Amino acid sequence: MEIILEKEDFLNGIRVVEKITSQKGTQPVLANILIESVASDRVRFCATDLQLAIEIKTKAEVKKQGGITLNSKKLAEIVNRLENKPVNLSVDFETNITKISCGKSKFELVGISATEYPKLFDEDGKQNETKTFEVSKNPFTKAIKQTVFAAAQQEAASVLGGVCINISDNILEVVATDGNRLTRTRKEINSKGEQILFIIPSKTLQEFLRIAGLLEDKDIKLVVDKNKILFLFEDVKFSSRLIEGTYPKYQQLIPTTNEKVVTIDREELINSIERVSVMVNERTNMVKFSFADKIVDIQTDTPEAGSGEDTLEIEYDFEPLVIAFNYKYILDVLKNMDSRRVKLEMSTSLSATVFKQDRKTPEEENNYVCLIMPVQAR
């Protein structure tokens, strides 16, 4: 095998796939990237940890066909430090020694035969139960960003460790919850009458966001079967197993009768919370909100260290209410909103509070909703 690539093409191929390699697995080949010719002018870079798999195709001058797997960490370090010149990669298949040269720099890496690498994508799209959707990248990635942070981080294998995707009546609904908070966003898509509900691991979607940020594609195709999802970009394939199980009936969890509604400037609220959080108890992360006539006091205290307090002027005409939250939960949702003002819909000090963007119509406000459970104020 012998190929020549531009350094930036080589480096971009590595960047897209390297995070999917398994550095601590029992199979050494999974710590490697597969580099393989697929045409006279194209090569592909592949990686997998057996849960996720990725492939990117890029242009190259292929002098001799073939494939090899090379350690992702060492390969990335080498290519990143090369001059901005064409890179020559050649493989001796008897020894699996790979020579990499660029300008006056020369390296040798001992690889593992491509025949030992797991087969990827060979069955995707062939199942009878497969459903395919095309979505615009920017709205879809925004929906993922607005929800994925609320998935349970310590329960990766359970349904709460994933993000629920519900496609029905040309509406894409994306939901995540860890039991203490819930986020839901809705986007219009052309689903061509298809209806499906599935759960994607949050780890998969974090990786998807990273990959999408490296690519210029405007549209993404989703291919879904009963236990796997495939994301198709123009030059990239990315697949993941889905989480099996029944997702909570989230529609029933979102309150619709909270009578206390207050509208607050979003940036002012973020700044106020960040100021007082300097004195937060790091064990509880609790920030207390005291709503009264036209103001809200935001307070933190750590008995052994001190306290902090900040006051905002607001429109509030209800009886006084004291309610406490994990401040990180509030910042997560506020920083994923883009409206100038936000609405808080509250009832009691122990019932769920709903955060919405302040929009022109209730329908627009309901397109992105975050529910946060209070904590016991002391």
Image (cartoon, rainbow, N blue to C red):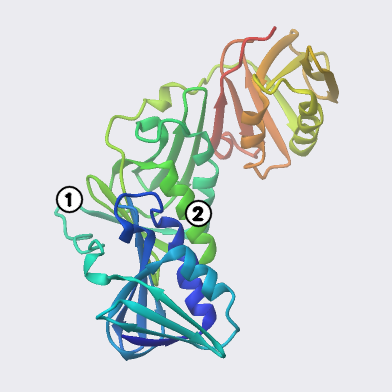
**Can you tell which quarter of the image residue 312 is in?**
top right
State the residue position of label 2. 209
Q: How many marks?
A: 2
Left or right of residue 188: residue 121:
left
User: Eyeballing the image, is 83 above or below 147?
Assistant: below
Q: Which quadrant is the C terminus positioned in? A: top right
- Report the front residue among 41 and 14: 14
Left or right of residue 153: residue 49:
left
Residue 340 location in percent, x, y?
Answer: 73, 41
Between the C-alphas of marks 1 and 2, the distance is 26 Å
Q: Nearer the viewer, mark 1 or mark 2?
A: 2
The residue under the point 74% across, 23% down is: 280
The residue lying furthest to the front in this view is 95
Left or right of residue 155: residue 192:
left
Residue 315 shows in the view: yes
- What's under tag 1, amino acid-wise? Glu
Residue 98 location in percent, x, y?
Answer: 38, 79
The residue under the point 41% across, 86% down is: 60
Residue 193 shows in the view: no
Label at residue 129: 1
Q: Secondary structure at mark 2?
A: helix
User: Eyeballing the image, is 192 above or below 74?
Assistant: above
- Report the front residue among 149 and 136: 149
Mark earlier in primary sequence (1, 2)? 1
Q: Which quadrant is the N terminus positioned in? A: bottom left
Left or right of residue 137: residue 269:
right
Q: Secondary structure at mark 1?
A: loop
Residue 75 location in percent, x, y?
Answer: 47, 70
Task: Answer few, some or many: residues within 10 Å of disc 1's Cα (few below 14, many 20 plus, some between 14 and 19).
Answer: few
Residue 361 location in percent, x, y?
Answer: 60, 37
User: Eyeballing the image, is 228 above or below 345?
Assistant: below
